[in-house]
Amino acid sequence: MKSKLLFFTAVISAGLIMAFATNGHAEYQMQTCDVVQAGIEETGDALFKFRPVGETKPKGFVAPVGREKEMLAIALTAMVSGLKVKALIDYQVPGSEIRSLRLFSE
């Protein structure tokens, strides 16, 4: 009886670990985007709205702490000059952190 309970507990634990390991990872991808909005929120967070090429609706993202000014400069430059940016973002999770941001000229 104890061995069956131990086996059952091990199987359930392994299943839970696998479920969290596969579903909990962000899907960060490099996306070519138009910058729709860039600025600083009242909380001090740098908020950006990007619309990837081919998408119709922009989504918001935040800059990592300590890199707000650099990313804001890149985003504003893109907006003023009409360039796009390459952003390493998880577009499926709005509000997630931007991992990388660079100007892009086609």
Image: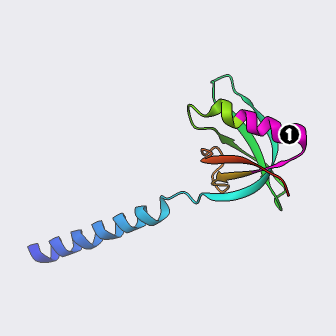
The answer to whether residue 53 of the structure is visible from this angle is yes
Q: State the image quarter where residue 3 is shown.
A: bottom left
The quadrant in which the C terminus is found is: bottom right
Foreground pick, 8 / 52: 52
**Residue 77 lies in the magenta stretch:** yes
Foreground pick, 71 / 63: 71
Which residue is located at x 63 percent, y 52 percent?
93
Residue receiving disc 1:
79
Residue 105 % position (x, y): 84, 53
**Residue lying furthest left:** 2
Q: How many marks?
A: 1
Which residue is located at x 56 percent, y 31 percent?
66
Q: Magenta part of the protein: which range? A: 72-85
Residue 2 % position (x, y): 9, 72
Regarding mark 1 in the picture, which secondary structure is present there? helix
- Is 105 displayed left or right of 60 in the figure? right
Foreground pick, 20 / 40: 40
**Residue lying furthest front:** 105
User: What main secondary structure does the magenta stretch of the protein show?
Assistant: helix
For badge 1, the amino acid type reads Met
Residue 30 % position (x, y): 67, 58
Foreground pick, 88 / 77: 77
The quadrant in which the N terminus is found is: bottom left
**Residue 64 lies in the magenta stretch:** no
Which residue is located at x 22 percent, y 68 percent?
9
What crowding class fits label 1: few (fewer than 14 Cα within 10 Å), some (14-19), or many (20 or more)? Answer: some
- Is 92 displayed left or right of 15 in the figure? right
Which residue is located at x 34 percent, y 70 percent?
15
Q: Is residue 40 above or below residue 23?
A: above
Residue 56 % position (x, y): 85, 56
- Is 86 displayed left or right of 45 in the figure? right
